[in-house]
Amino acid sequence: MTEDLGLPAGAFARLDETPDEDFYAPPRLVYHIDDHAVAALTAFYRTVLPAGGVVLDLMSSWVSHLPPETGYAAVIGHGMNAEELAANPRLTRYFVQNLNRDPALPLDTASLDAAMICVSIQYLQQPVAVLREVARALRPGAPLVISFSNRCFWTKAVAVWRALDDSGHAVLVRRYLQAAGFAEAEIHRLAEYIEDQQDPMTAVVGRAAAV
């Protein structure tokens, strides 16, 4: 069993087990979802992320998809490529860390008003450990938005993700959040798949438990 999820051994194995630092070394300054999915996610962030708050963009890149008209006290970025993070104009500061090797976040307890993980949850080999760290850093009741599409780097996605469809991914992410101690875990369909011409987009929102 793995991470209190009732999954068999090998659930978090990957086809490519070479070091993540090597895979993510080349900067990828491209969108990983289509324009429609980006617009749907930005609109959703507008309703969930608190304006003026301190926000964590975990597993980020050169773009955060935040509403352009909304200001935040701080946007803290994390990722695997410093060049991508440095190119992200919304980040006030950032750090590079391999969460599959070290899930402990260098963030103070109850220091965040919101967090998000965009199209990256499928790469975590210790998802519950990482999400417990996010829960620790969030203020009580603060949201974590985990969004995903049907796109991914297939060889770096964990086995359980590769075995499931979009609906199964949503249920899996909800299980991650529940196992990590989040008080809520709601599934939202943001954009539907349309015959290879439009990406689907799903968000699962967890809320940090009240003290």
Image (cartoon, helix red, strand yellow):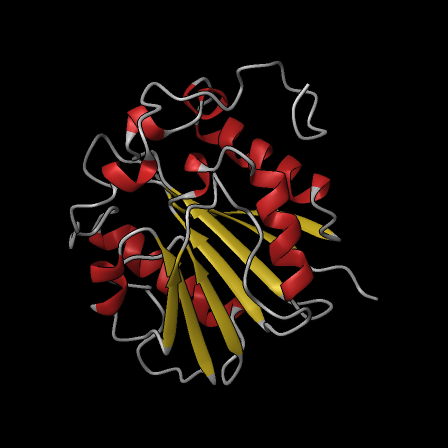
Residue drawn where x is 75% and y is 53% of the image: 183
144 vs 103, nearest the viewer: 103
189 vs 14, nearest the viewer: 14
Q: Is residue 55 above or below residue 117?
A: below
Q: Residue 89 falls in which quadrant of the image?
A: bottom left
Task: Residue 76: give x, y in percent of width and height.
Answer: 43, 70
**Horizontally, is 112 left or right of 161 in the view?**
right
Task: Residue 211: give x, y in percent of width and height.
Answer: 84, 66
Quadrant in which the N terminus appears: top right
71 vs 100, nearest the viewer: 100
**Horizontally, is 25 left or right of 96 in the view?**
left
Residue drawn where x is 30% and y is 78% of the image: 68
Residue drawn where x is 54% and y is 77% of the image: 50
Q: Residue 174 falls in which quadrant of the image?
A: top right
43 vs 209, nearest the viewer: 209
Q: Is residue 41 above or below residue 3?
A: below
Task: Residue 81: give x, y in percent of width and height.
Answer: 27, 54
Q: Is residue 2 above or below residue 189?
A: above
| Farthest-out residue, right | 211
**Horizontally, is 57 left or right of 7 in the view?**
left
